């Protein structure tokens, strides 16, 4: 499942209203906000700069769809130009998103789930390729002469108690992603970096 803007946008949007301009100025100053959308026209926003508002047309490169994938290349290109994007659902403004919204928990959880799936897939690929835990330990040993990390790992996994524990688990379950990538590259199954 792809992560979309409905999960990270701010939907509690304050709209610019000229009748309450003083309150809008205070609101923007207190929260360091640059843009307020228009109350009357979803195609217009008000840019706050130097204690005043200037109306601007919301351009296509400032718009995203509520269901759009947050890591779509076109979205990332938009963020290179604008730090705030306006979120629309069927031509109606439903929220705003700032690039800092990518620091929210739904994004962290999504990225973690992708990494977890990738790691699981690597374990399955190594097993499918006919490799076993012994191949990983041999990999550590083979690289231990010139790599202190692999030397430490080889000594750890050579421990009889750890060897027993490994046998009780599914293949490659005790190894870290970095190690899985190292073995995958070493065996030329895939080229990963």
Image: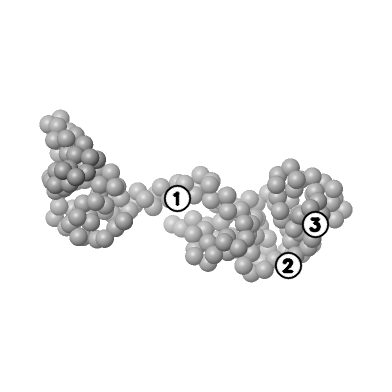
Q: Earlier in the sequence, mark 3 or mark 1?
A: 3
Q: Quadrant of residue 129?
A: bottom left
Which residue is drawn at the image coordinates 15% and 39% (left, top)? 167
The image shows residue 24 at horizontal and vertical percentages of 80, 49
Question: Of all residues shown, which one is farthest toward the right?
Answer: 19
Structural distance between the alpha carbons of marks 3 and 1: 37 Å
Judging depth in this view, the residue of 67 and 32 nearest the camera is: 32
Pick the front one: 66 or 136:
136
Q: Residue at x 64, y 69 (%)?
A: 60
Residue sitting nearer the eye, 128 or 157: 157
On the image, the x and y values in percent for residue 109 come to 45, 46
Cβ atoms under marks 2 and 3 closer than 8 Å: no
Note whether residue 138 is visible.
Answer: yes
Residue 171 falls left or right of residue 93 = left
* Badge 3 element: strand
Residue under pointer 1: 110
Please name which of the two marks, 3 or 1, marks the residue nearer to the observer: 3
Q: Which mark is drawn over residue 57?
A: 2
Q: Which residue does the numbered mark 3 point to in the structure image?
A: 53
Residue furthest to the bottom: 60
How far apart in space, not on screen, are marks 2 and 1 (Cα)?
33 Å
Question: Dot 1: within a 10 Å radius of its alpha carbon, few (fewer than 14), some, or many (20 or more) residues?
Answer: some
> Which numbered disc, 2 or 3, marks the residue closer to the eye?
3
Q: Position of residue 26 (x, y in %)?
A: 79, 45
The residue at the far top in this view is 161
Q: Considering the numbered disc 1 on the image, is that residue within a helix, a strand or a loop?
A: helix
Task: Quote the CA–CA distance across marks 2 and 3.
Answer: 13 Å
User: Going by the image, does 22 lie left or right of 88?
Assistant: right
- Residue 140 in view here: no
Label 2 sits on a secondary structure element that is strand
């Amino acid at each position: 499942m792809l992560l979309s803007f409905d999960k990270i946008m701010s939907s509690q949007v304050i709209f610019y209203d000229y009748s309450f301009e003083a309150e809008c100025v205070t609101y923007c100053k207190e929260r360091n906000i640059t843009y307020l959308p228009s109350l009357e026209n979803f195609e217009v926003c008000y840019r706050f700069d130097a204690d005043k508002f200037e109306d601007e047309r919301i351009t296509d490169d400032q718009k995203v769809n509520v269901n759009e994938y947050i890591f779509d290349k076109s979205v990332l290109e938009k963020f290179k130009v604008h730090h705030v994007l306006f979120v629309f659902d069927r031509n109606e403004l439903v929220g705003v998103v700032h690039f800092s919204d990518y620091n929210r928990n739904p994004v962290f959880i999504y990225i973690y789930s992708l990494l977890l799936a990738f790691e699981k897939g690597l374990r399955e690929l190594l097993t499918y390729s006919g490799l076993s835990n012994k191949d990983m330990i041999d990999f550590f040993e083979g690289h231990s002469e010139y790599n202190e990390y692999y030397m430490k790992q080889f000594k750890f996994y050579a421990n009889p108690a750890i060897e027993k524990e490994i046998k009780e688990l599914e293949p490659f379950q005790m190894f870290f992603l970095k190690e899985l990538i190292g073995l995958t590259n070493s065996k030329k199954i895939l080229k990963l970096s």
